[in-house]
Image: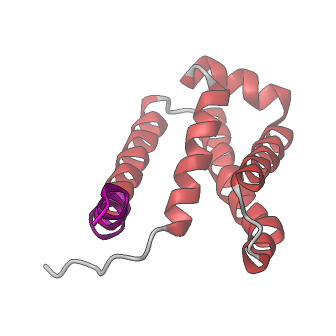
Amino acid sequence: MEWAVIINEVFTVVLIPLLGILAKYFIQFINIKAEELKHKKDDALYQKYITMLNETIVNAVTTTNQTYVEALKAQGKFDVDAQKEAFNRTYNSVVAVLGDEAQKYLSNIIGDVNEYIRTAIEHQVNVSKAPALPAANG
């Protein structure tokens, strides 16, 4: 058996399911940090902008997936270039909805807004791809 086949099998059997589990915990971590940020700054403007940012990211990822990604996947044409285009469409949509005022405000609170948006988009894409895990009994 060739090494490439062995590596492919290990990746398929072990790493892909592990990535789904890790994505779930990463999502929980991001949600906890977002909640901490919400409580750290207790004014209405902060709540408005951080909620707007997170909802805009979720909506933009969903929209791009429905209007662009699903069609390309159905045609078997969702390659690396299409993935980059999907990300750019989503990112540009988020930035356009936020506007300058929200971006300035958020940059004072969270620092690099563009990096936050990039990371949150990637996170939301992973969330939308991850299989639902069964609820814990207890």
Residue 28 drawn at (x, y percent): 36, 53
**Vertically, is 19 above or below 128?**
above
Residue at 69% x, 58% y is 61
Q: Which residues are magenta?
A: 1-20
Q: What secondary structure is the stretch in magenta mostly built from?
A: helix
102 or 123, which is in the foreground? 123
Q: Quadrant of residue 71?
A: bottom right
78 or 113, which is in the foreground? 78
Residue 10 drawn at (x, y percent): 28, 63
* The C terminus: image quadrant: bottom left
Residue at 39% x, 56% y is 23
Whether 86 is among the magenta residues is: no
Whether 9 is among the magenta residues is: yes
* The N terminus: image quadrant: bottom left
**Vertically, is 65 above or below 85?**
below
Residue 93 drawn at (x, y percent): 82, 47
